[in-house]
Image (cartoon, grey):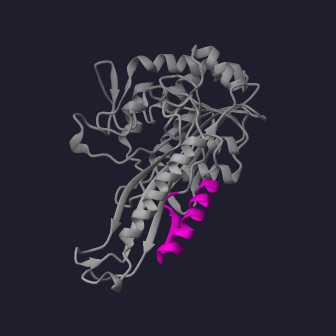
Amino acid sequence: MPATVPPLLTMMDELLKEISVSSTSAQWDTGNRHVIDKLAGWLSTLGFSCEILPINGKPNKANLIATLGTGPGGLILSGHTDTVPFNEERWDINPLALTQRDNKLFGLGSTDMKGFFPIAIEAAKHFLDQPLKEPLIILATADEESSMDGARQLAAQGAPKARYAIIGEPTNLRPIRMHKGIMMEAITVVGRAGHSSDPKLGNNALEAMHVVMADLLSFRAELQQRYQNPLFNVAVPTLNLGCIHGGDNPNRICGQCELHFDLRALPGMNNEALQTEIRQRLQPLALKLGVNISLRSLVNHIQPFEQTADAELVKVAEQLTGHSADAVAFATEGPFMQQLGMQTIVMGPGSIDQAHQPNEYMALDQVQPAIDLLKQMIAKFCV
């Protein structure tokens, strides 16, 4: 190994020390370029051809495509370089460094998912002196934890191209071939404010929203009758009423009210069709209640993800891990990899149960099995 490439745990420590929070809130949001530049430096030293692709409108953020070998096809090992925001005072240890304790590797992003990159690099090092029939690509993306703009931009650009993609999100090294989609929507009701002593002076937006909420819950029940998938722990689509804001004083008729909700669709459902159906349900309510009702997306939709059970990548992963491909509730960049034409699975070290919380860690005993598994996948699809 070239002396300029640090050992695995040193690489992980260096990545964790770089703050790369992505958030819809500007006060938390940072860039990821330091992480991208570190990865590009290490991978270039190992002989990878590295392309850094800035994110449109975000000069402090970028994707990285690092390629070993040439030709069509090949295998992508993909991960995101950003983390969620964190409250340092809630951590028992330094979140911005690697701490090894009790056979665990602690630190922000250790499992979700900066820790995947040193493991992927360690697996790739085994093939540096071997001719590859198909290229090996290590892909690092930006903003997965917020907008997924990194993966969206790659899909729009049509690159990188490969036959297979493994997204190394934490799944305890079990292959995942399905997850639900995500819609986060806002409904705004505009009525007419007035003095509360005389209801005819206004049109209460809160009361109208009460009718809207009842209709949304009826819609949820209808969806759950129409769609079920027993492979998911929660086998039906979910619709959660998350927060509501309206009015300003008890003695004033509420003139405006806004509700935020999320809808998580199963594979086979389509977010845009669901949004259209909701909008069509709201129109007659607005006419009946004499208010204005509008619907808008709070974030760009993430479609449900499904890789067919008979796909070669799924079959190989099942054979190597001894586990049947499963489904998870959390969303990934999988749909965007599929837009690029690749068979895609989610499979990586660590547990999602440790993500997005203080004292995040990856179990140390997951590291070597993850390296060995990725080496087997590279040997199958690249050599």
Image height check: is 237 above or below 175?
below
Q: From this viewpoint, is residue 323 visible?
A: yes
Q: Residue at x 72, y 25 (%)?
A: 310
Is 247 placed left or right of 269 in the picture?
left
Quarter residue 12 falls in: top left
Judge from the rendering whether residue 221 lies leftward or rightward of residue 324; answer left or right: left
For the C terminus, the quadrant is: top right
- Is residue 195 one of those drawn in magenta? no
Q: Which quadrant would residue 94 be assigned to in this image?
A: top left
Q: Position of residue 260 (x, y in %)?
A: 42, 59
- Kindly report the secondary structure that dominates the magenta region of the rendered protein: helix
Q: Residue at x 73, y 22 (%)?
A: 131
Asked whether 42 or 188 is in front, the reply is 188
- Which region is colored magenta? 272-299
Identify the residue at image location x=48%, y=41%: 38
Q: Along the line of sight, which residue is nearer the eye, 175 or 20? A: 175
Res. 7 visible in picture:
no
